Image (cartoon, grey):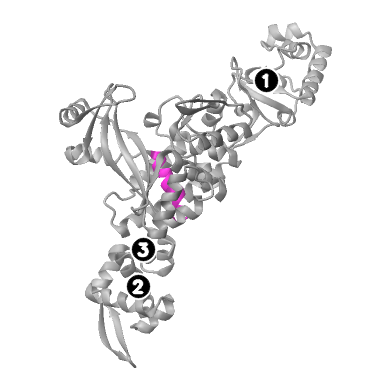
């Protein structure tokens, strides 16, 4: 398991470093920073995430019910112990209550055992060298699990639970807009609410579904407990918990799982536009402030009354913040957006994140509103191709389709085009000491008209110069300015360019 975890971390580091390089080449105002990757890795290294959930991964307070085969396994254990020991004596000496099996056998209401009880049995068996319980066999007979005192159970066809099944992708995809601890999800769209309702049923929970202005879906605390085992802090708000997408979702689930997850993130926390070449996903993070920093913001911020609750909040744009607070803002992104960027990068979908405004709540909690931005024809197209079959909110899907159909940006931007042709020219020049337009035509397979435009642009930028003629073609070389440009971009081969930009 440790080696698998280390492999996952290495994959995440690789994807993060590709985003760092993308940010540098495209000169983003808010680049993907090494500090972001370090924070994400630090969180993943200190988390205890599981995607295969066995019997003893469950909380001690969970009650477990078994099918007839499981009950017979426990009955045989009880009869063996009864024949060898005094059951009451075992309780007095070892503080382990085997009478609970007896009650389970004779009682219709007391038909379950707690994880805590099962663990006490295992401890007793180990202390007395009794190989009478195969826990792997017993867990395959489990038919329901749930917290003690709760009537809402998760019905299963044996354990372990595999969170890599696609029905779980729908549930993890809406967590940013859910009350995770008891899994309460609210939606405006009935189809969306029904979709989540259906997938809760697939994982074995009978959800509570109601309409009251909005559609409410309750998955109960059993879902919150399972999500907690998966690696998310369910006891705090997302702003304070700063949860990430668990590492195993990024590295141990398949393309369809990722398609579902990202489409649900778009459905809940995302926006698409028919006229603007971008898709955004919004999330907030906590901004730790000293008292003098808080007072500075409050004195300069705009007071707002939230209509729904009547609560007061204060907002301030980044431009009005002091330089020291702006630096603190930039270093505190939501880790969930960082992990979404990493997942998108797995499919060569480049994105950037940037902060917009700072909010101060009525109880003086400061938060930063961040946007993840997928921009440009190629990256939007790759996102759409990945997620189109699972986007539920119809207008968001329609906006992307209209954007792509109207877009004329089926070619690279000028800056990217210049870099692309300069890299190809560099490769040719290394082989024959110069290059021609015909050489570029052969190596890139682009149209001659496009290549002529590219050479014109490179010449105007003073990135190339003519040194003579070869037949009817000009002999060209990369100028010192062009070489400096490539050094500055830190990319000088086609394979790396293609990997970073998917072009």
Q: Position of residue 90 (x, y in %)?
A: 73, 10
Label 3 Cα crowd, 10 Å radius (few <14 / some 14-19 / many 20+): few
Label 2 Cα crowd, 10 Å radius (few <14 / some 14-19 / many 20+): some
Of pointers 2 and 1, the one earlier in the residue sequence: 1
User: Residue 409 shows which numbered tag?
Assistant: 3
36 sits left or right of 152 in the view? left
Please, is residue 301 above or below residue 412 in the view?
Answer: above
Which of the 4 quarters of the picture holds residue 307? top left
25 sits left or right of 149 in the view? left
Tell me how many marks there are. Answer: 3
Q: Residue at point 45% right, 33% down?
A: 188
- Indicate whether residue 340 is drawn in magenta: yes
268 sits left or right of 210 in the view? left
Prevalent SS, magenta region: helix
Please, is residue 487 above or below residue 31 in the view?
Answer: below
Of pointers 3 and 1, the one earlier in the residue sequence: 1
Please, is residue 397 above or below residue 109 in the view?
Answer: below
Q: Position of residue 113 (x, y in %)?
A: 68, 17
The residue mark sitting in front, 3 or 2, is 3
Please, what secondary structure does the residue beneath circle 1 have?
helix
Q: Nearer the viewer, residue 111 or 450?
A: 450
Q: Would you name the residue on which mark 1 appears?
A: 118
Q: Position of residue 386 (x, y in %)?
A: 50, 53
Can residue 256 be seen in the rendering of this structure? yes
- Indicate whether residue 368 is drawn in magenta: no
Q: Would you name the residue on which mark 2 appears?
A: 421
Q: Bounds of the magenta span?
A: 335-349
């Amino acid at each position: 398991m440790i080696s698998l975890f280390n492999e996952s971390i290495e994959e995440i580091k690789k994807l993060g470093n590709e985003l760092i390089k993308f940010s540098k080449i495209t000169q983003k105002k808010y680049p993907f920073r090494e500090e972001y990757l370090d924070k994400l890795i630090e969180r993943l290294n200190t988390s205890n995430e599981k995607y295969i959930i066995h019997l003893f991964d469950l909380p001690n307070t969970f009650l477990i019910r078994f099918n007839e085969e499981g009950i017979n396994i426990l009955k045989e254990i009880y009869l063996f112990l009864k024949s060898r020991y005094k059951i009451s004596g075992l309780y007095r000496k070892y503080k382990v209550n085997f009478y609970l099996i007896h009650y389970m056998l004779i009682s219709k209401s007391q038909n379950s055992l707690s994880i805590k009880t099962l663990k006490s049995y295992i401890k007793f068996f180990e202390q007395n060298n009794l190989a009478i319980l195969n826990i792997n066999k017993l867990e395959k007979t489990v038919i329901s699990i749930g917290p003690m005192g709760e009537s809402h159970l998760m019905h299963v066809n044996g354990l372990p639970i595999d969170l890599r099944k696609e029905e779980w992708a729908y549930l993890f995809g809406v967590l940013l807009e859910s009350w995770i601890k008891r899994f309460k999800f609210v939606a405006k769209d009935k189809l969306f609410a029904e979709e989540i309702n259906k997938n809760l049923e697939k994982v074995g929970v009978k959800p509570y579904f109601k309409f009251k202005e909005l559609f409410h879906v309750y998955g109960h605390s059993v879902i919150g407990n399972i999500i907690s085992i998966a690696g998310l802090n369910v006891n705090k708000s997302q702003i304070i918990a700063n949860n990430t997408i668990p590492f195993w979702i990024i590295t141990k689930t398949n393309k369809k799982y990722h398609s579902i997850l990202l489409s649900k993130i778009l459905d809940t926390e995302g926006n698409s536009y028919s006229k603007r070449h971008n898709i955004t996903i919004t999330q907030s993070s906590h901004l730790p402030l000293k008292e003098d920093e808080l007072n500075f913001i409050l004195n300069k911020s705009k007071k707002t009354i939230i209509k729904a609750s009547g609560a007061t909040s204060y907002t301030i744009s980044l431009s009005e913040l002091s330089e020291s607070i702006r630096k603190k803002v930039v270093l505190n992104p939501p880790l969930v957006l960082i992990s979404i960027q990493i997942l998108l990068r797995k499919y060569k979908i480049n994105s950037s994140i940037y902060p917009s405004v700072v909010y101060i709540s009525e109880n003086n909690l400061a938060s930063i509103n961040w946007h993840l931005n997928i921009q440009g024809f190629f990256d939007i197209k790759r996102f759409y191709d990945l997620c189109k079959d699972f986007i539920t909110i119809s207008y968001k899907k329609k906006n992307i389709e209209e954007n792509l159909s109207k877009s004329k940006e089926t070619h690279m931007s000028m800056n990217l085009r210049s870099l692309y042709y300069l890299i190809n020219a560099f490769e040719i020049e290394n082989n024959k000491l110069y290059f021609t337009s015909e050489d570029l035509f052969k190596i890139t397979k682009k149209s001659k008209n496009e290549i002529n435009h590219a050479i014109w642009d490179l010449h105007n930028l003073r990135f190339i110069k003519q040194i003579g003629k070869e037949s009817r073609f000009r002999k060209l070389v990369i100028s010192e300015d062009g070489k400096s440009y490539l050094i500055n971009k830190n990319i000088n081969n086609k394979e790396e360019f293609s990997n970073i930009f998917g072009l």
